[in-house]
Image (cartoon, rainbow, N blue to C red):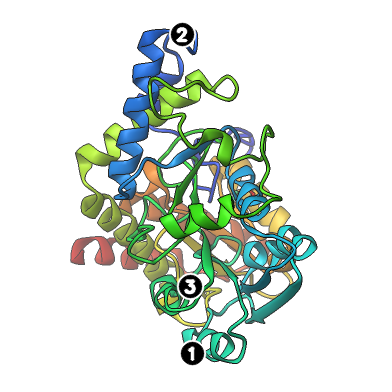
Amino acid sequence: MTQPRNETIFTLTTGPVNCYPAVLQALGRPVLYDYDPGFLETYSRVSQKAMAAMQTSVPPIILQGEPVLGLEAAAASVVSPDDVVLNLASGVYGDGYRYWLEPRCREYLEIRTPFNEAIDPDAVAAMLEQRPDITVVAVCHHDTPSGTINPVAAIGALVAKSRAVFIVDAVSSFGGMEILPDAVHADIFVTGPNKCLGCPPGLSLLAISAKGWEKIKSNPRAPKASILSILDWEHAWRPDQPFPFTPSVAEINALEAALDLYLAEGAQVVWARHAATAAACRAGIKAMGLTLWAAREEIASPTATAVALPLGVDETALRRIMRDDYGVMISSGRGETHNKLVRIGHMGPTAQPIYALTAVAALGAALNKLVAGACDIGAGAAAVIASIDAS
Ligand SMILES: *Cc1c(COP(=O)(O)O)cnc(C)c1O
């Protein structure tokens, strides 16, 4: 290629992801005054649709910032100076949650795995038995910088039998695979519309159980009159209740469009579309001669595929060739996984099996420019198509 393309045509990242066209249209709708009866109705309706998507019995809390706000708010609202906290760290996000937990609690405990592995529920069971004084357990469901999934339902069933409340980061898995707050016994379930729901970053969604509310309300340190407050927004979904401050009107409109698409397509169909895309991608990566980052394929995420970098390949150089020569943008590793892997997202609009072909071909071609003969692109492409045909 003589002239670098130097623009992105396919954003196949792990978030932010490209938005659905209907979401972009909704962002462009007139911005109503937040106490306009039309917007009050919209806000209440969006809360109900979010509740339907999350299959909870009360509407989720919508916080006004991308999901890191929801995660910090969860720690700030739940954790009190009396708490003994168990954090489950199998990747960069799970590990990083320590930053918000540790300064707020009496004692911080941790179970760690290598960042290409998943948490073993037996280890959690043993820890809960040994330390019945644990009052908070936190886990990241899909640790995106590793593309690996933790067995949250099994862990949640154990935590539910203890006195502890269970905080789950499901930011990059909710909407792209089967993960529902009540089914996994989550007490504070944090997600956002900017990954698998195909919205721009800007909001957090928090589903909170009765046990979760009880814990938050009994915590004298739970923020109030603060951007971190969950309590401030408890009743905001009711049309007769005031907002604590101005909601992001345009983002709420966009969220409604995304929820409409999700509910109309049907959760099972959406999840299958993500799973089929990831399966095709993994098949292509392996057939091309590359290695998945996940230690075991069973823990590889349906919403992102992490590919181990061949020795000596620089991720920045690789991703630059992919973008400049082919117009394909994928994600790098983060923190401890930086320069050890690259990641292809299958989230929302890009969870379409045929996108795996674009990702595999562009990755293989770029790698071959750095290491001659590294990838058999033909074999990779054939495996992607075979996987799509079989799904
Ligand atoms: C994307 C994501 C978040 C939000 O974090 P940002 O880095 O600000 O996008 C939180 N947790 C997980 C698991 C995520 O994938």
Q: Is residue 132 above or below residue 45?
A: below
| Residue at left offset 42%, top offset 49% | 347
- Residue matched to label 1: 122
Q: Earlier in the sequence, mark 3 or mark 1?
A: 1
Q: Is residue 249 visible?
A: yes
> On the image, which quarter does residue 99 sit in?
bottom right
Q: Which disc is residue 37 wearing?
A: none
Q: Earlier in the sequence, mark 2 or mark 3?
A: 2
Q: Nearer the viewer, residue 73 or 25?
A: 73
Where is residue 267 drawn, in percent x and y? 25, 50
Considering the image in quadrants, where does the N terminus appear? top right
Which residue is under mark 2? 32
Element assignment for label 1:
helix
Could you give the CA–CA distance between mark 2 and mark 1, rounded to whole angstroms?
A: 51 Å
Amino acid bearing label 1: Asp
Question: What kind of residue is marked 3?
Answer: Asn
**Visible in this render: residue 189?**
no
